[in-house]
């Protein structure tokens, strides 16, 4: 693991997610750019001291020097955005597989370079767009793909948070707020990069469509903040489908209820994280249905990503774990020379990373533009 | 009553709404432009045959000719949009008070003319924007006005319907669909006029702010339809507040769950019609609260518009009735030479009508414009 | 109307319910045993002074003396329980039809006498068990009757209130609390009579079954109270179905969320007043369904009792109005010599009244008994 | 681990729960009474073959023979009920700590013997009553303990399941159904042992009260079934508090929505697993509150058992993991000679096990008794 030292939120989440299905063992780490802090973190995690490194360079070099059967296979990169590209590139080029937090890089250009590295090295990358790990999100995608709601027409996706509703940047105990609102660490986008990319990815994942044009209202609401903390985007997808994406971090009191609604000619699907094990399916002329995680009627994609019977709620950590597990299963199949199943291959990767970075660049540009519709450029 | 003959949906709603609080008695009507149908409707409603008229002209003229104590006092206009302005104007000019369905007229210019008529005649008009009649919508407005959620920053309002998700226009049994999608009867807007105006009114009512700029994506999704059936609008309000308005009639399977969320620096309020007796109030640092119709802690505005104790749900018809009742109470106070209370005056009137028509014209223009932000012009 | 003077809760509810569908006109009343108060109430309601009476005896006698076409046809009795039987009996014996609030009488014996009076006079009686007026409760009953959930096995019905969670009896402004907890006015039961009867009626209505045995835990929780304010009852129904009934008025903070769940071999139905326009239907092997008021797929019984399209919530007052309307339609059909339809006949009457009183006597006796199961005796 | 071979539901749950917080490492197991199956299961789990045993006797004996630093410390027993007591006793007597699934033993007498063994050996035992592991259940308990809802008066606890709504016993693929309905493996109770004990434990945990009397209706609904599959119990607790417990496995279509409501003089708390991260707190005179997992206002007990910020749902596996983690932390503190904190000690143990077995014996006896109230005997 690179990053995720003591006190980091997302590093701990990655470690739990990796552990849940027993597909990974944490064997080494460079948990902080501060060598002492990295050491302390690694020891607290029970690692052998010799495999707690003081930088990602050191980690990659020294692990590469180990005999293959001892060497780490997959490197998780959970650092702030500005320290994504370099370690990912170096890891891939040195023979490691990579799990990386979103957004994948600091710029679109870096994401495209990473794509080239992956093509060249044949190594794999998993990008942790958590929300697509939920079984009922997968079920929604499957129902759409199966034509259950007919030809698509409308997409609403929203991600309201309130945790940045005040100026938290100066608050030393809120490191998240500090780096996520700092352009030198987060990139050109704040809310749009942090959660807008999740909403965008969720919309493209469930619909199977691509955004082709957009028109964005991007705001910095809290005084003194250096990046956007709020935005709403009108969207055009393939096939004339239209949509709306809303992402904000200043909806005071809101938690994290990412929600998607997709409507087609024959019905609609609605999912939200606050009731994550439920998928509502609507029809024009019969009762709506409540599809549930664990229901025997679900598709293989939902079932493959479920551990417990219906009514035993699975949550955010399990959704996150599904990404890790599917990636592990894909790798294991490949190591054995087998073809991974469609269910195993169902994790976000470099394509989603490139599109996510393109979303960031396009949405910020649109926010500044006086032109209404701008094409989604990659 | 003008309009609302047999088979009409909204006419029957108006009659129930007027009856609930026993403030009105139906005494005369011109229920259809077809004299025989008007007659049949009036008789079925138990009216004296002599006061069932064959046109609104006849109704206004003959009622005016009656002695004052027998004459109708308030005329409800529940016809399609293209037959709003003329009867309203004529009624006001002949000494009657008017209740009228939304949108108030066919064009903004007509609404402005009506405003002049009202100023000149001193007669009053009540515009039936139903959703502002709900006690918990009033409570939301009051909490905002009292500063409970601090300086406002973000507004989301949405109105998803699915009843026009297929081409219903040719369906003879669906008269609603026929006239609401016919530009000669509905005006320049379909969904934006029918439900977009409700959402717009709700947003301005709850926040106490005015829209100043907008950027609209207006669509006609169903093939063959002649007016818009879907739209999403980015909004700017006074004081730098931004918002999103979504209104669609093609969200297949959706019913009528109009919803508003408003966030300020100190909290947020959230209301939706599917749970109409509940208002969620959110805070950054303490548990969210569930405010309920009938709760002893509500403001005088909510309480004044509630008939039953908490837990006895009041619905759409009661919300509608609140408009009728408040209008009646205002009229009665004026007739007695008294000043109506703020609670009695709390019904939508000509100002809301003019702004609603301006919304229609601005939003349709923006939908056609290549310019991103356009000022909200009246 | 007998009872329901100024300040009374349920009298006002009856009047609104009667008005909503324009099937009744309030023409006379004896609104209070205090003649002056009755007069003031009647005048405030806009009645002719000559038809505001100072007692129910006077009302019945003087109305009977009027010519038939002027005379009141239906008398609503909305007094406290101890003034139910006498006016109901007198009204029926003098040729009037009766609407009466629940519980129907003070004792079971009185209810049985009333049954005999009805048989003898051929007059009709409607008992206002409001909750069976909800469209989705009717839909639940219909699905059960149609075998949609198979052979029944389990019934849960609950009615949690909190309005008597403190000692309100001495509070002069809370007249409800005063008489409902006074054995000389309410009868032998408090909560069991006031709301337990509703729960019991709802269970028998939805299932179509009769309770045959019961085992009750009846409590007076608030110190100083003279009647029960809480109870739970184990039930046996016909056909070996078992159930649980819970009714309490001391669930502090609870409003009025009466709820029923019925399970059969092939599925279950679940309804609660807080989401009154929704009926959840569950199956062992496919997604649960959300049946909604106004859905085109509902039975004629639900549809007959619905005024607005799906998504326009109907509430408590509309449910109440359904009882009044169905009763009016039954009477009108009979007056015309026609057979009322099954939908029109679908209102609670004397049988439900007798069973309700039997419930009160059986449940209070069981509460005092050391015997576990006691037969449900009539 | 003893039990939990391939295909077992609860064994896999235990393993995930133990892994989530990285406090345990699976080092050995006797996963089945079938040696070959045990071996296969252990190897699939990645264990060293030498530490996959063919019986629990072998496991305990051989592990005991290992040097202390290599030896397993905690043994999880996840077998059917009839194989709980012997391995638990043997493990404790040979110096191991024990995690054990509920109900703790086959009979109350065994539970009491186990209590004596624990007293004698000083070893610790954790009983996996999962539902008390949820942060918002802990918050409910804390609010009650802090007097937030005043002197208690009423408890409703329910556990409706539908998975045994048909005769599944003969279904070879449903091993759960087979053993849980077999008196030789499950004990004298079916539903009451499997889920009634959970409901009972939850009620005593949240209220801090003990059941003193009960009156049970115990049913075997599905023909051919050998144990109860349904029951409802009237309860008396300390201090005159009354309650109702409902547990059924034949509520067709119900999943697993265990729910508890507790009311006191000053308010109420309501929690249900379907919305596990929410606790509703009700008051007589102010808006209800929505307390949420991750809220900064929660008690140290809720916070200690939460991994992610509010809005990132934690579910059943995390609740289960909380038991494992608290037990591990308690053990670690003791091994270091420190006093565990109250939060660490907050896991169910032998007392809860004894009371759970007493519940089973008392409730089955009451179900057969003709006496109404029977004392809760231990």
Image: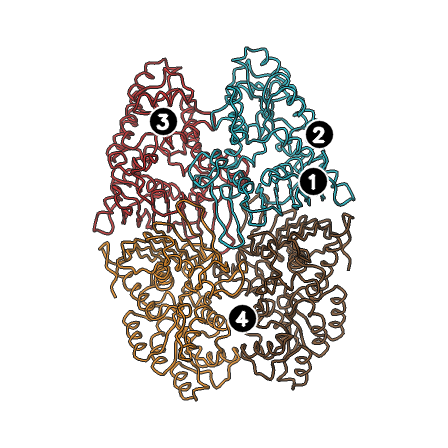
Chain colours: A brown, B cyan, C red, D orange
State if disc 3 and disc 2 touch (CB < 8 Å).
no
Instruction: Let me know if marks 2 and 3 both belong to one chain.
Output: no
Identify the chain of the residue marked 1, using the numbered disc in the image.
Answer: B
Using a 10 Å C-alpha cutoff, classify the residue at mark 1 as few (fewer than 14 neighbours), some (14 to 19) or many (20 or more): some
Q: Are marks 2 and 1 on the same chain?
A: yes
Q: Which quadrant is home to the C terminus of chain C? A: top left
Alpha carbon distance from label 3 to label 4: 66 Å
Image disc number at residue C5: 3
> Do discs 2 and 4 belong to a common subunit?
no
- Check if mark 3 and mark 4 are on a common chain: no
Helix or strand or loop: what does disc 4 sit on?
A: helix
Q: Nearer the viewer, mark 3 or mark 4?
A: 3
**Residue D35 point in image, percent of width and height:** 44, 81
Return the mark for residue A20: 4
Question: Nearer the observer, disc 2 or disc 1?
Answer: 1
Looking at the picture, do discs 4 and 1 lie on one chain? no
State how far apart marks 2 and 3 are (Cα): 49 Å
Q: CA distance from mark 4 to mark 1?
A: 51 Å
Q: Quadrant of residue C67?
A: top left
Return the mark for residue B107. 2
Which circle marks residue B212 in the picture? 1
Whether B244 is drawn above or below A19: the answer is: above
Residue plotted at (66% across, 21% down)? B117
Question: How far is disc 2 from disc 4 in space, using C-alphas?
Answer: 62 Å
In the shown orientation, is residue B60 left or right of residue D142?
right
Task: Give SS at disc 2.
Answer: loop
Task: Tell me the number on the disc at residue C172.
Answer: none
N-terminal label among 2 and 1: 2
Q: Position of residue A255 (x, y in %)?
A: 56, 56
Q: How many marks?
A: 4
Please state the chain letter of the residue tagged with numbered disc 4 in the rendered image.
A
- Give percent across and percent down for residue A105: 71, 66
């Amino acid at each position: 693991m690179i990053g995720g030292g003591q006190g980091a939120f997302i590093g701990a989440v990655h470690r739990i997610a990796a552990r849940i299905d027993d597909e990974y063992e944490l064997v080494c780490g460079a948990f902080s750019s501060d060598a002492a802090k990295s050491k302390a973190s690694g020891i607290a995690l029970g690692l052998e001291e010799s495999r707690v490194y003081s930088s990602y360079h050191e980690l990659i070099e020294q692990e590469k020097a180990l005999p293959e059967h001892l060497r780490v296979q997959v490197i998780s990169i959970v650092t702030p955005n500005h320290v994504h590209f370099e370690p990912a590139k170096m890891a891939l080029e040195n023979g490691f597989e990579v799990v990386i937090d979103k957004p994948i890089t600091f710029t679109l250009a870096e994401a495209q370079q990473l794509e080239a590295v992956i093509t060249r090295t044949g190594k794999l990358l998993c990008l942790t767009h958590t929300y697509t790990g939920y079984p009922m999100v997968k079920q929604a995608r499957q129902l759409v793909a199966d034509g259950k709601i007919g030809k698509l027409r409308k997409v609403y996706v929203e991600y309201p948070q309130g945790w940045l509703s005040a100026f938290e940047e100066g608050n030393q105990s809120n490191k998240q707020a500090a780096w996520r609102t700092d352009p030198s660490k987060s990139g050109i986008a704040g809310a749009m990069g942090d959660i807008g990319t999740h909403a965008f990815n969720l919309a493209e994942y469930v619909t199977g469509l691509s955004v082709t044009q957009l028109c964005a209202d991007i705001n910095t609401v809290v005084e003194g903040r250096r990046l956007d903390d709020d935005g709403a985007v009108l969207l055009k997808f393939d096939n004339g489908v239209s949509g709306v994406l809303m992402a904000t971090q200043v909806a005071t009191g809101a938690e994290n209820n990412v929600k998607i609604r997709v409507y087609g000619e024959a019905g609609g699907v609605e999912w939200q994280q606050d009731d994550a094990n439920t998928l509502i399916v609507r029809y024009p002329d019969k009762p709506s249905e409540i599809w549930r995680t664990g229901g025997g009627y679900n598709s293989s994609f939902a079932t493959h990503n479920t551990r417990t019977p219906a009514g035993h709620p699975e949550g955010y950590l399990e959704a996150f774990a599904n990404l890790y597990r599917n990636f592990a299963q894909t790798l294991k199949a490949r190591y054995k020379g087998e073809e991974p199943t469609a269910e195993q291959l169902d994790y976000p990767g470099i394509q989603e990373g490139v599109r996510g970075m393109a979303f960031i660049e396009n949405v910020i540009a649109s926010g500044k533009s006086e032109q209404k519709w701008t094409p989604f450029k990659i």
